[in-house]
Image (cartoon, rainbow, N blue to C red):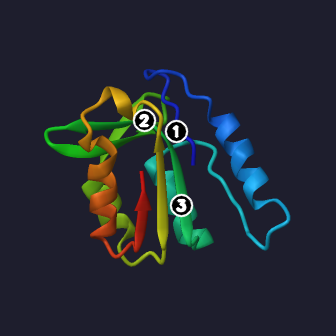
Amino acid sequence: MACSPSDQPTLDYEREEEALFRAIYDQDVAFDSCDLGTFEELKEKVSEFKPHVVHLTGHGAVLDGQGRFAFEKEDGIADLVPSEDLRLFLAGSGVQCVFVSGCQSGKAPLQALSGICQSLVGAEVPLAVG
């Protein structure tokens, strides 16, 4: 899932998606993606598709000491979902790995993506990479 809220710096998520397609080319892999970038869409897709790996591309931040991932609201602006909400959703979902690619995380405290990943691993997700 690529999330590029209109009120955040623009991302080149198409280039990252192309790299993913090259990596899985000619492999026995089922691939699906989301179009809206909303947290609700991610929940629906994971519930329907039952993936082993989830790849999130977007912006990460730390607010009030908690890592957050910038999904999109229906109007296109950022929906900074706390890592706790991701953790609660992914617990028991069957997802084995979450890859969090937050290209703007360097502008946030070092805990930005580690906070998200640490929370996810605590939710019975065996592997989270930020």
Q: Is residue 53 above or below residue 76?
A: below
Residue 56 shown left or right of residue 121 in the figure: right
Residue 116 locus on image (x, y percent)? 31, 52
> Mark 2 or mark 3, which is nearer the start of the sequence?
3
Earlier-in-chain disc, 1 versus 3 = 1
Q: Are marks 1 and 2 in contact (CB under 8 Å)?
A: yes
Q: Secondary structure at mark 2?
A: loop
Q: Position of residue 85 (x, y in %)?
A: 29, 57
10 Å neighbourhood of mark 2: few (<14), some, or many (≥20)? many
User: Which residue is under mark 1?
Assistant: 3
Amino acid beneath label 3: Val
Who's the residue at 54% across and 54% down the image? 55
Whole-Å distance between the Cαs marked 1 and 3? 13 Å
Tell me how far mark 3 sits from mark 2, CA to CA. Answer: 16 Å
For label 1, count other residues whose C-alpha is less than 10 Å away and answer few (under 14), some (14-19) or many (20+).
many
Q: Judge the density around disc 3: few (<14), some (14-19), many (≥20) Cα neighbours within 10 Å.
A: some
Q: Residue at x 26, y 39 (%)?
A: 110
Q: Secondary structure at mark 1?
A: loop
Secondary structure of the residue carrying numbered label 3: strand
Q: Is residue 15 left or right of residue 72?
A: right
Q: Residue at x 30, y 66 (%)?
A: 88
Quote the CA–CA distance across marks 1 and 2.
Answer: 8 Å
Residue at image mark 3 = 54
Question: Looking at the rendered structure, which numbered label has been put on residue 59?
Answer: 2
Q: What amino acid does circle 2 point to?
A: His
As drawn, 7 above or below 130: above
Residue drawn at (14%, 42%) of the image: 65
Q: Classify residue 89 as left or right of residue 66.
A: right
